Image (tube, grey):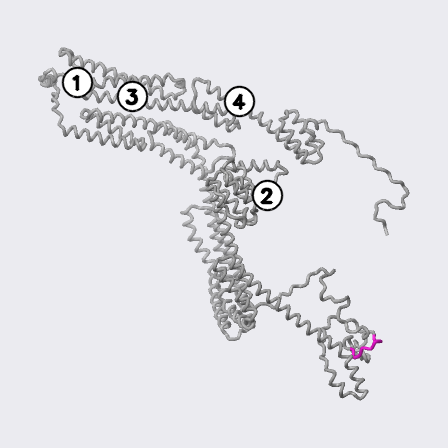
Amino acid sequence: MFPFFSRSKMSDAPEVNPAPAKTHEPHPLDALTGGAFSAATSGERASRIRDWLATQPSPEQLQEVFKELSGRDKGAARAVRERLDEIRRAKGQEAIAAEWAEKAQALLAAPKLNIADALAWQRDAAKAGAPLSREPLSLLKVQLADRVKVIEDLQHRVQVQREAAVLLAQRIEVLSTKPWRDAQAALELLRADVGRWQEQAQELTGDASWASVEARFPPLLDASRTQLLVVWEAFQPAVAQAVAAAEDTAAPLPPVPVWADELRAARGLSTAASEAAAASAAAGKPARVAKPKVAPEVIEKAHQLVRDALATLEKETAEGHGKASAGAAAALRAVLKVHGKHIDNALEQQVHTALVAAGELEGWQRWSADQVREELVAKAEALLNRPEGQALGGRKMQETLRSLREQWKQADQGGAPNHALWKKFDEACNAAHKVVEAWLDKIRAEAAEHKAQRLALIEEVKAWAQEHAASGDWKAINRALYQFGDRWREGGHVGEKIFAELQPLWKQAIALAAAPLEAAQKESLARRHAMIEEATALGAAPSLRIDAVKALQQRWQAEAQTVPLDRKHEQKLWDAFRKPIDEAFNRKSADRERAVTELSARDRVVLDASKALEAANATGDAQQIRAAMQALEAALRGQAQAAEAVATANKDAQSQAEARSVAAPAAAEGGAEAVEGGDAAAAAPATPAAPKPAARPVVAVRGDDRPGMKKDAPAAPGRGARPGDRRDGRPGDRDGARGPRTDGRMGDRGDRGGRFGDRPAFEDRGPRLGDTAFRAQREAMEHAQLALKKLAAQAHGEALTQLLTAWEKRDAALVPGAQELGAGVTASVRSAWTQALSAAPKGDASEAMLRLEMAAEAPTPAEHIAARRMLQLQLLTRRNDPAPAQTWGQDVARVLAGPSDAASARRLQNVLKTLLRK
């Protein structure tokens, strides 16, 4: 044989000692990286690289290490490459941040800041990738926002000042319709209000951001100042002249007619009216009639009208209706012009306060409506200026334009219209609508093409119907009709009007083509109904004829393959056809099984145990269910034990029969000797007749060379054809000397285990149960298992609810026992939970909660997903730490040690539903 070692013994060459391995010199960068290049494994190398990166090396060192390490270990070099990329990105972002910071500082340093430029800076910086959330861009963004807010506040204050000026002028007008003493009493208050208004206007113009206000606001403020000063400068001398005329009768009367009449009446000049009338008549003008004394009902009516108008204005102002409040203010002013001289000072003060509030609301509504309009103009202009690859399609463009125009209508409802912005908005929408027009033209062209295709399909169906009118291949006709239907459905979109014109033509053509098939299907239905009646008659017959059923089924199959029907209709017909036949076969099977399903004594025991188990299932008691299950299993095991006893009895009977068959030859020989000796009469009754052994079945036959096996050669005397059929057992006989063979060729092979004696014996399952008993015990066991699962789930839910209640109340006594919590919770874990609940709430359990959700593979709320990802990345770096699935008991204890709230309780409940079942 060949030797099994490597060096042959035939070789005389002496063994050569192997040369010692070379000692590797340390890498020059090992000292820098902490031995990363001399590490034995890739994991150790990566760990040392991470430790070295924590020391914040310089970019030059990083580049050198990456250049050397990338050729050796790409996995360890990945961390160095990521650090280099991060430094590169940081440098790029610093350059971008410096550029946009310079632009922002230029905007802030400019004496005039345009709001649009400030908003565009933030938008363009974000598009360029500038880090707006980091310094200095975050501070500059806040400064620009504050600057824009100041400018917008100035513009709003200008509108408020304008309305205040209008209201002051209206107050002066109202005072000119009242007695001059009322005007004299309100003079100081008016002087203070006018002075305050001028101070506020001066503050606006003196503000540092006044130069950045839009160009339309300064003229508004100047016009309001000019108008107010004109009225005020005319009102002051008139009041002074009225006071002087009251003190000196020779002084001239004031230019205000009401005050002049009052002073004339005070001087006792009663002829003033007649003189005025005469002078008027002389001049050809009608004379002025002297005002009569105002009646109390007129004053009451004036107060009522003013109060109604005032209530309407206050209601519209409170609800924020811009247009309605403006109309109500105009109505109130009109009422004041007519009845303002008949109201008292308190009501007049309420009127002025309401008019001021309405003016502020109108100015704010106008300003906010203009802001909305400007945004809509920007959106309309941006429809055609979208980035490449993001252009809107025709339908989307049409819907967007319709939405923008609806928003513009709503903006017009909330404030006064702005024709300049409307013109820009309309031009932008018209320019964008060209895309919609092109899309509509394309849709019309496609609709015309689809209409032509459908008309061509209708003509094709008509021609096909004439060509295949006499065809008998109903399957091909049905397939073609389905294909025509699919082509019609996939014919493309057409308008509703065109479709309404084409649909009747299509129905007419397809009905003409399907007429022969429908006639054939009608005849086939009649034949199938006849076969159903025939099947019903066969099924109702007392004796089921199998040949007739087979012939009828073949006829049905031939009919179904010849004429196709609708699948659902054909299935219903087939069910109706097979139902009586199936019922007949079921009756036959039931009759056959009725004898088999006779209940034996053992079946009754199993049935009784199954009924007891069903009753225990209905009680919902787990102990009763388990006890009933054990009783049923004992009944089933009793079958196997009885079967084993029967098998043992059969085996003993067979052994006795074999012993008798062996002893039969010897007894026969002794009897013959007794007969020769003259004692045949005594020997004959002493020898019982041995039963004839049952002949074993022939398993295999050898050749015909054995004696007695050839049919043409008789067997040798004294020797049977088989070894077991011998009549004598002489010692000299080869077969007789061995005696009866009680085992096989290689011993008793019936009780061997396997090929080498290790195969287990077949399980003796006993006699088979009857169908009724078998089904009853199987259903009872299934119901019992389901009931136990349901009870276990209920117990699990109650234990979890008790645990959450104990956490909420910080009561360790409410913690359920270890048996109730399940096998996953050991006594030490439960002890840790109770200790956590016994102490005061402390600590932050957010990381423990995330570990629990990772262990249970449960979803995390959206606000904690970033923290979970960060924790997963940290766990990847902790090589020897146990996984969350191994430490979930300690994590639950940390969570229970913290404070309880609804969100945390819900998350803990979702986690423990899974973990307590593992």
Residue that carries the numbered disc 1 in the rendered image: 259
Q: CA distance from mark 4 to mark 1?
A: 70 Å
Crowdedness of circle 3 by 10 Å Cα count: few (<14), some, many (20+)? Answer: many
Q: Name the kind of residue labelled 1 in the image.
A: Trp
Q: Position of residue 739 (x, y in %)?
A: 79, 74
Q: State yes or no: discs 2 and 3 in contact (Cβ < 8 Å).
A: no
Q: Secondary structure at mark 1?
A: helix
Residue that carries the numbered disc 4 in the rendered image: 99
Please identify, in this view, whether the residue under mark 2 or under mark 4 is nearer the observer.
2
Q: Secondary structure at mark 3?
A: helix
Q: Position of residue 430 (x, y in %)?
A: 41, 33
Lower position in the chain sequence, tag 2 or tag 4: 4
Residue at image position (21%, 24%) is 345
648 magenta-colored: no
| Most foreground residue, 474 or 513 | 474
Q: Mainly helix, strand or loop, the magenta region?
A: loop
Crowdedness of circle 1 by 10 Å Cα count: few (<14), some, many (20+)? Answer: many
Residue that carries the numbered disc 3 in the rendered image: 165
Magenta stretch in the rendered image? 726-733
Lower position in the chain sequence, tag 2 or tag 1: 1
Please identify, in this view, whether the residue under mark 2 or under mark 1 is nearer the observer.
2
Q: CA distance from mark 3 to mark 4?
A: 46 Å
Residue that carries the numbered disc 2 in the rendered image: 886
| Most foreground residue, 392 or 604 | 604
Count of marks, rendered view: 4
Q: CA distance from mark 2 to mark 4?
A: 52 Å
Q: CA distance from mark 2 to mark 3?
A: 78 Å
Q: Position of residue 168 (x, y in %)?
A: 27, 21
Q: Name the kind of residue labelled 2 in the image.
A: Gln
Crowdedness of circle 2 by 10 Å Cα count: few (<14), some, many (20+)? Answer: few
